[in-house]
Image (cartoon, rainbow, N blue to C red):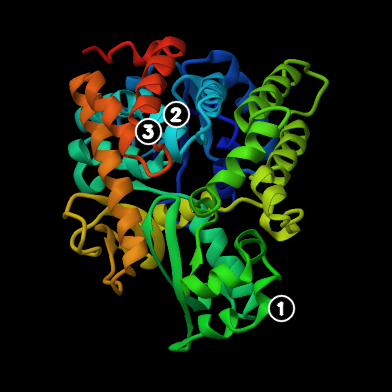
Amino acid sequence: MKLAILGGGGFRVPLVYGALLGDRGAGRVTRVVLHDVDAGRLRAISRVLAEQAAGVSDAPEVSTTTDPDEALRGADFVFSAIRVGGLEGRANDERVALAEGVLGQETVGAGGIAYGLRTVPVAVDIARRVARLAPDAWVINFTNPAGLVTEAMSRHLGDRVIGICDSPVGLGRRVARVLGARPEEAWIDYVGLNHLGWVRGLRVAGQDQLPRLLADPALLGSFEEGRLFGADWLRSLGAIPNEYLHYYYFNREAVRAYQRADRTRGAFLRDQQESFYAGTADPDVSALELWNRTREEREATYMSENREAAGAGEREADDLSGGYEKVALALMRAIARDERTTLILNVRNRGTLSPLDEDAVIEAPCLVDANGAHPVSVDPLPGHAVGLVCAVKAVEREVLAAARSGSRGTAVKAFALHPLVDSVSVARRLVDAYTAVHPGLAYLGG
């Protein structure tokens, strides 16, 4: 099988390739084509993959191209992992938002909207190319904001595009671990939007173990979300929120922490990855070792400002290993080999969350087989969660409308309606500032 990775010069690609190296049997990926607009990044990542494959006799063949059509033609699976505007764009998203006193995180709030406005037109172009060049391919979307981008692509690819994220996987793994359960033997009752979901139950042998966790302050304080949100708030919710909900529940504290930081997260990653790519140019340096050191630092500092604001301490060692590449591999195996499994994915709603329409992309447990991913029925969300999900989905729809029409007024509406942007005046200034720093937003007119 052929796998095309768009954004193949990206830093996380070796995680995916490493997962492929351990896959065996019929229907495995034998050919990987990396596409990127930056040939230098492709060379760097190719060096890392070559070292990973050393000694593996049947490692998937790797080739590179700067031509997206060449990458897509004949693909069985397509990974979309693009970053429009690069990490400099992310740093600008954060800087502009924080100057207005609002959140600039790449998937949440003003920063997420700006990133979405830049990314959706490119993602739609990719979807159209896939439909033309590889109509039978399955697209696995890694590109953030994952739910929004998956929905944009689904309008051209239907259910053949599936969004993935490692955040729910990590949350479920941590909750299972503190309850003494094996994650693969537990049913995680999780639903919402990407980076906006809640674990409402964890069933082992048919018994919900979450009430036991919520009743035990020591257990609640023993894992990341418990320390991040606090035991009292989790008991009030009766659920364990995705870590990104810290930006909503403790917004003022998060904004202050990011304003006080020496660098924004985007600027840190920009500088870190520039150093990595430059370092791989030295033939005497192990590109794989350099990549591993860089990845460990990246994972250890993830959401550090939020943890500092909450007094949550350092990340646990078990949480530094990533996970989205395992979700991607499990998804591909289920589709290619009909190895039926259950995964938390970003897919079209199909009536799963009744407040949203059929085509709204949600994040929910799905049964996956050769015919794709099918969201399972879930209990209704409580009112406070319904309100937040509906508000954010309405913003996503305005972003899609602005990207389609090029309307500046619709873009302003998207910012102004977001729960974390509390002023139409601020929304107007954000649109002006973002269009000034991002050439990719020049399409926003009157």
Vertical order, 373 against 422 (above or below): below
Label 3 to label 2: alpha-carbon separation = 31 Å
Which residue is identified by label 1?
Answer: 218
- Please state the horizontal and vertical placement of residue 201, each as a whole percent of the image: 45, 77
Vertical order, 132 against 65 (above or below)? below
**Residue 412 image position (x, y, % from top left):** 30, 26
Mark 1 vs mark 3: in front: 3
Q: Local crowd at mark 1 within 10 Å, few (<14), some, or many (≥20)?
A: few
Q: Earlier in the sequence, mark 2 or mark 1?
A: 2
Between 153 and 390, the one lying in front of the other is 390
For label 3, the residue is 423
Earlier-in-chain disc, 3 versus 2: 2
The image quadrant of residue 139 is: top left
Amino acid identity at mark 2: Ile
Mark 1 belongs to which amino acid?
Ala
CA distance for labels 2 and 1: 41 Å
Q: Quadrant of the N terminus?
A: top left
The local secondary structure at tag 1 comes to helix
